[in-house]
Amino acid sequence: MAASREDVKFLSNPKIGLRHKKYCRFKKFGIKHIDYKDSDFLLQFINEQGKLLPRRITGNSLKYQRRVSSAVKRARHLGMLPFVADLMK
Amino acid sequence: MRHYEVTFIVDPVLSGDEVKSTAEQIQREITAAGATIVAVDEIGLRQLAYQINRRSSGVYYCIEFACLSSEWLIKFELGLKRNDRLLRFLTVKLDKYGIKYNDDKRNGLIGKKKREAAAAAAAPPPVQEVPAPQVVDLDAV
């Protein structure tokens, strides 16, 4: 007899499988300016190869994704972030 | 007043005095053109993420200044480009949010650790006197 989902829910964590609503962290916390000199903050938006993460992964709105993108490109120009990397995180 | 921010990287092989004199020379250029310097941030020696001109580190400086007219900026940037002691430079115009962000950063209002330190300094956690446990000698009973 296969266990139905309702049965499984009470045997393990009932919150398993719930998708967290993705939100834009800039809109939510009212952050208006993204500093290109803050490379530790910008690390959140690039992957291990140093590439920019897509908006559907980070949850940013279009306006702030564009600002993040230009901040990362400025940081790359100034040598604070690499253009290509390996095992960045 | 238009606010701008110029970040530049000075060659690290120069001696400390030469690095400082390069930064001061650029500051003098800015004030000579009639701009008021809001802040000079010496970020210092930092590792570069990739080699620039076969150097792997550089001394970073960030100067924020305000000016009324901005025609001199083009010549200023040309001067930076011709300067042999600079590796890279970037001039950015700051909007009102950028100005406010820089102000807050200078006053220490940005950053979780700084806020926690401020909160801890303001209200030190109450020290509770824990009574020392009474030593009962069971053998004597």
Image (cartoon, coloured by chain):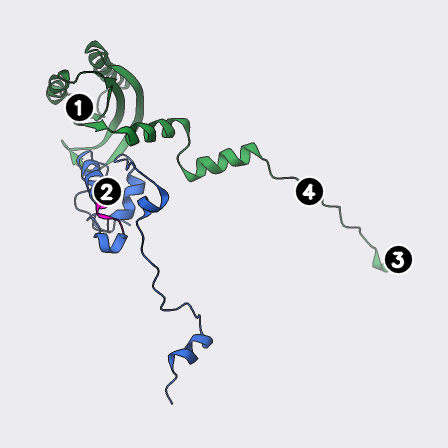
Chain colours: A blue, B green
Could you tell me which secondary element the residue under label 3 belongs to? helix
| Disc 1 to disc 3: CB gap under 8 Å | no
Residue type highlighted by circle 4: Gln
Query: Which residue is the site of mark 2?
Result: A68
Query: Looking at the image, is mark 1 or mark 3 earlier in the sequence?
Result: 1
Q: Residue at x 75, y 46 (%)?
A: B131
Disc number lying in front (4 or 1): 4
Estimate the spatial distance between the alpha carbons at disc 4 and disc 1, rounded to whole Å.
57 Å
Q: Disc 4 vs disc 2: Cβ atoms closer than 8 Å?
A: no
Numbered circle sitting on residue B140: 3
Q: Position of residue A38 (x, y in %)?
A: 30, 37
Report the magenta residues as a range: A60-65
Residue identifier under label 1: B86
Q: Quadrant of the C terminus of chain B?
A: bottom right
Whether labels 4 and 3 belong to a single chain: the reply is yes
Image quadrant where one finds the N terminus of chain B: top left
Q: What whole-number distance in Å separates the C-alpha atoms at marks 4 and 3? A: 32 Å
> Label 4 marks which chain's residue?
B
Q: Tag 4, which secondary structure?
A: loop
Check disc 4 and report the residue beneath it: B128
Which of discs 4 and 2 lies nearer the camera? The answer is 2
Q: CA distance from mark 1 to mark 2?
A: 26 Å
Earlier-in-chain disc, 4 versus 3? 4
Distance between mark 4 and mark 2 Cα atoms? 47 Å
Q: Position of residue B25 (x, y in %)?
A: 22, 13
Which secondary structure is most common in the magenta stretch?
Answer: helix
Q: Tell which tag, 1 or 2, sits nearer the viewer.
A: 2
Q: Distance between the Cα atoms at labels 2 and 3?
A: 74 Å
